[in-house]
Image (cartoon, helix red, strand yellow):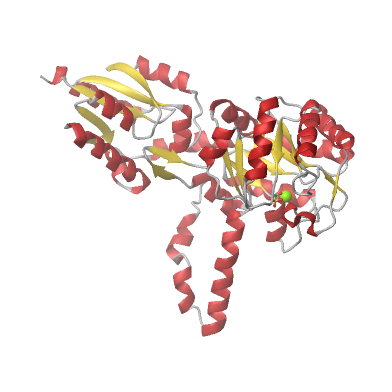
């Protein structure tokens, strides 16, 4: 008897409409229906950050006629529920047969096969109504007030945040939309890093605060125009304290979530030069004063100022780095970024360990450009909160463009360069008219 069968389906949307409700009703007609409501982090990995919190979405699911039970679903596929509870049927709309979601479908099929469960698919298309709801949601998420606060919320709910560098609208779209499905989970970057190195390199200029704040803000604006994810801004030295307070207010008003300023003074050069070039570190007193002034200038609770310590870069030693970290936190810094240009992560690990012995709360940020063999899992276990992939999109673009330029110069035509390029059809369809 169908009433004795058990049925499972997932809800991975925050605004339900008729199409979803119809599938829920069909699922309920097959037996006793359990609904898996995706947790906030599963939702963010799968598509985008939810507008409504897990608790609110759960309450809606519980109120739907035909739903017998609601469970929290930590993965996109709900594989863990299938394997544990072994429901007779898994119900899903058939739209997941195509595109990136097909990997999730395959995974569910394997789980069902392992115990003899059955997949039931009902016709479902993401129609105009659904598109309109999604556009509304994205519009809401991109509003400065909504965007600014999201990084703090993510830090409260996730053990580790990842950010990838974005330097333009196009790279912003890659940071926003790239998803990899793996072991039942959707992997996405949580935030974007607007790097001074990349912003300068893109303009063919050295990374020494030559690209001015107006131009840097224009880059942020371009990225914000087409994305919704939170932004971490590389504020270099922050400039004069008298100027820094204005920068804080402007960034905050724009919807940026965090600025990271480094404790260098005078003509700043890129940290990866280390001691090969003349660079001077600010005094603890002056840098603390800058942090305090910035914290006083900000208008919202959500905006964050992170102090970046250059002691390891400038070979001033770990003790100096730890002393500075304690002073900067006392001055009001929301977080500490510790930087290193060594390929061996040992000095970073040692700093993180000693810092965490004294301070369990303050946000810790790392930029593993040189010590890139360390995994996110390892950073998380050691107590790091944010990992920034600071320059990889710019660095990957450069060799690709150079190869194409050399190929055209070699063959005096473009045919041989085609294999390095995306097709014309792909490029014209890459950017939807209405983002
Ligand atoms: C940047 O991306 O501009 C940074 C990180 O500040 S680094 O280039 O390593 O100094
Ligand atoms: Mg920089």
Percent x, y of residue 141: 56, 34
- Between 333 and 44, the one lying in front of the other is 333
Question: Horizontal placement of 46 versus 254: left or right?
Answer: left
Percent x, y of residue 390: 63, 49
In terms of image quadrants, where is residue 403?
Answer: bottom right
In terms of image quadrants, where is residue 429?
Answer: bottom left
- Between 333 and 45, the one lying in front of the other is 333
- Between 134 and 371, the one lying in front of the other is 371
Q: Residue furthest left?
A: 1
On-image quarter of the N terminus: top left
Query: Above or below — where is 271 with respect to 285?
Result: below
Question: Horizontal placement of 109 versus 43: left or right?
Answer: left
Query: Above or below — where is 222 with respect to 44?
Result: below
Who's the residue at 86% across and 53% down the image?
267
Q: How many badges with numbers are in the image?
A: 0
Who's the residue at 70% across and 39% down the image?
337
Residue 136 seen from this side: yes
Who's the residue at 27% across and 29% down the image?
83
Query: Above or below — where is 6 with respect to 248?
Result: above
Percent x, y of residue 54: 46, 22
Percent x, y of residue 200: 72, 57
Who's the residue at 13% across and 21% down the image?
2
- Between 329 and 373, the one lying in front of the other is 373
Residue 22 seen from this side: no
In terms of image quadrants, where is residue 151?
Answer: top right
Question: Horizontal placement of 261 versus 377: left or right?
Answer: right
């Amino acid at each position: 008897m169908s009433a004795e069968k058990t049925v499972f389906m997932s809800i991975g949307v925050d605004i339900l409409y008729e199409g979803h409700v119809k599938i829920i009703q069909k699922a309920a007609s097959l037996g006793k229906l359990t609904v898996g409501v995706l947790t906030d982090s599963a939702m963010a990995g799968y598509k985008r950050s939810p507008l409504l919190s897990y608790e609110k979405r759960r309450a809606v699911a519980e109120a739907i006629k035909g739903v017998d039970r609601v469970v929290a679903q930590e993965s996109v596929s709900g594989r863990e529920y299938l394997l544990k509870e072994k429901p007779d049927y898994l119900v899903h709309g058939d739209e997941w047969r195509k595109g990136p979601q097909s990997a999730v479908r395959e995974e569910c099929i394997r789980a069902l096969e392992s115990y003899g469960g059955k997949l039931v698919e009902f016709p479902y298309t993401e129609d105009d109504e659904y598109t309109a709801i999604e556009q509304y949601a994205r519009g809401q998420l991109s509003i400065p007030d909504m965007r600014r606060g999201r990084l703090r919320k993510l830090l409260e709910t996730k053990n580790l945040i990842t950010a990838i560098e974005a330097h333009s609208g196009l790279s912003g779209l890659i940071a926003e939309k790239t998803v990899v499905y793996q072991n039942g989970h959707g992997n996405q970057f949580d935030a974007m890093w607007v790097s001074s190195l990349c912003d300068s390199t893109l303009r063919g200029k050295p990374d020494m605060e030559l690209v001015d704040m107006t131009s840097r803000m224009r880059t942020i604006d371009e990225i914000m125009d087409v994305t919704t994810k939170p932004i971490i801004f590389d504020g270099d030295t922050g400039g004069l304290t008298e100027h820094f307070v204005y920068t804080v207010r402007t960034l905050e008003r724009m919807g940026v979530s965090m600025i990271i300023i480094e404790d260098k003074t005078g003509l700043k050069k890129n940290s990866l030069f280390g001691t090969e070039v003349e660079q001077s570190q600010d005094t603890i007193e002056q840098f603390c004063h800058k942090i305090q002034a910035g914290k006083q200038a900000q208008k919202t609770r959500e905006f964050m100022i992170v102090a970046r310590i250059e002691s390891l870069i400038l070979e001033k030693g770990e003790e100096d780095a730890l002393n500075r970290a304690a002073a900067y936190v006392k001055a009001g810094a929301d977080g500490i970024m510790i930087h290193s240009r060594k390929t061996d992560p040992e000095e970073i690990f040692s700093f993180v360990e000693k810092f965490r012995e004294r301070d369990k709360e303050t946000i810790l940020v790392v930029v593993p450009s040189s010590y890139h063999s360390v995994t996110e899992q390892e950073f998380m276990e050691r107590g790091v909160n944010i990992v920034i992939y600071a320059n990889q999109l710019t660095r990957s673009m450069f060799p690709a463009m150079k190869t194409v330029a050399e190929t055209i110069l070699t063959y005096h035509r473009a045919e041989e360069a085609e294999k390095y390029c995306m097709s014309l059809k792909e490029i014209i369809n890459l950017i939807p008219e209405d983002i």
